[in-house]
Image (cartoon, rainbow, N blue to C red):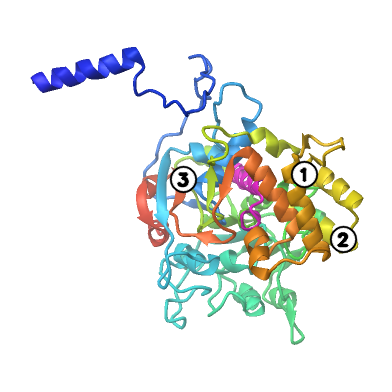
Amino acid sequence: MKHRVFALLFALLLILTGVGCKSKNEPVVPTPTPQETQPAASTPAPVVSGTPKYIFFFIGDGMGAAHVQLAALLDSASRPDYAVTPVRFAQFPVLGNAQTYLANTYVPDSAASGTGLACGVKTVLYTVGLEADRKTIAPNLTEYYHEKGYKTGVISSVAINNATPATFYAHTSTRSNYHEIGRQMARGTVDFFGGGGITSETQNGESVLKLLKRAGYTVADTIDQINALNNASGKVYAMDPNATNNIMDYEIEKKEGALTLADYVRKGIDVLYTENGPGFFMMCESGKIDLAAHNNDAVGVISEVKALDNAVAQAYEFYLQHPNETLIIVTADHETGGLTLGTTNTGYALYPKYLLGQTTSGSTADTAVKAIGKSMTEDQLKDLIRTHYGFNAPGTSGGSVTLTNKEWAAVQKAYRVYTGKENISEDEKFELYDTYNPIVQACNTIISARTGLGWSSHEHTGVPVPVYAIGAGAERFSGAMDNIDINKNLKF
């Protein structure tokens, strides 16, 4: 007892004298007033037990917890109190985390990790809907619910026969069998396909779209046709009319009137829901989180996490109308980029304001660089980084951030490497830019470094991913789990 009293008195002495509270090297951070530290108000909905009739399964491809927090930070960039309002789905009352390892590696690809979510089995890299022997069919969730008489839907912002969406309706030994995956869309277990186009749509004279039409699908590929779809439309493929290379535009670059991921979820509800009907299962993927994270493009990541959040909002509106019959799950197939919020250079600080100057995705900046080509002049380079990133080269103006001499030197080096004016070894080139456009990668690196964002990789990582849930049966998704447990818990 005497020891406990002494310990308490010693701790009190430390507090009163300030000893142990701050090292001499720790930067001074402004202390908000008590009023400023109050979090934004939110009212989590209660967890409802029971069997859901309507199931929404959202997947942020490549989305780790840091990606979710980053999207929230951008909206807090101009706040003086450092408070963060989470994206909507991060406020759901049930929180878990899921392991993503495969049968043959700790670091997954989207096909095999998607198979874990869609089919509930651990398989090997690049495999779609098959067990680890790459032969045995692993039934997926749309097949499961189709057999139970439910309507089913698969939506993605990337190609509808890309790895993750493919795992919800196809079975093949490798994700690169795009045409074969597309052919399996016509099997009929999915009532509504929506979003991106079809990679390798035609092969050896065979068209996937024609196969779908022969199988009784309506293919809607204009905004008017898609808007006209309803629960009397039968089986549908709503193919985004503005998709480039079968991929929908980034959310921050949407043209007025263009369809969003949220629009496809809303239209999916229109097609699949019937009052007093059988119920439905819908999977929706925000696929470009992964694409942006591969390129270490922070603003692109934010754009597509917000696209996912807006899509989830459509499901949440439906949930509010059917709270005892609806389940919403949000998770990821894996994490991409090894993203961290905070670096050695920025210490105990983040500066999300630097992200505000970037007005397009890194992908669009890459397209702009390639449109000019290797004959690009330095004046064109200055215009390009100002237009896309808000960067002013030293001595110029018009952007939101003036580069330091060191930062400008890094951009100039990338420019010389891209245009062939400077030759560096392949090892150095890979270390600086990986396999990406040197100019774009240099700009992405600068904006992340200024913000205080760290990236350990241009590839996937093996960290667990978050799981968010609300609605009937949501209690199944609390705590630590494996990704295949998500599949098992989604079978009611």
Up/down of 248 relative to 307, above or below: below
Q: Circle 3 sits on which residue?
A: 468
Q: Earlier in the sequence, mark 1 or mark 3?
A: 1
Q: Earlier in the sequence, mark 2 or mark 1?
A: 2
Up/down of 16 relative to 344, above or below: above
Visible residue check, residue 429: yes
The percent position of residue 118, horizontal first and vertical second, equals: 48, 64
Looking at the rendering, which quadrant does residue 195 occupy?
A: bottom right
- Residue at the spot 76% in from the left edge and 51% down from the top edge: 411
Q: Circle 2 sits on which residue?
A: 371
Q: Is residue 84 left or right of residue 445?
A: left
The percent position of residue 83, horizontal first and vertical second, equals: 54, 26
Contact between labelled residues 1 and 2, with CB atoms less than 8 Å apart? no
Q: Circle 1 sits on which residue?
A: 389
Tell me the distance, in whole angstroms, between the alpha carbons under discs 2 and 1: 17 Å
Secondary structure beneath label 2: helix
Q: Which residues are magenta?
A: 291-315
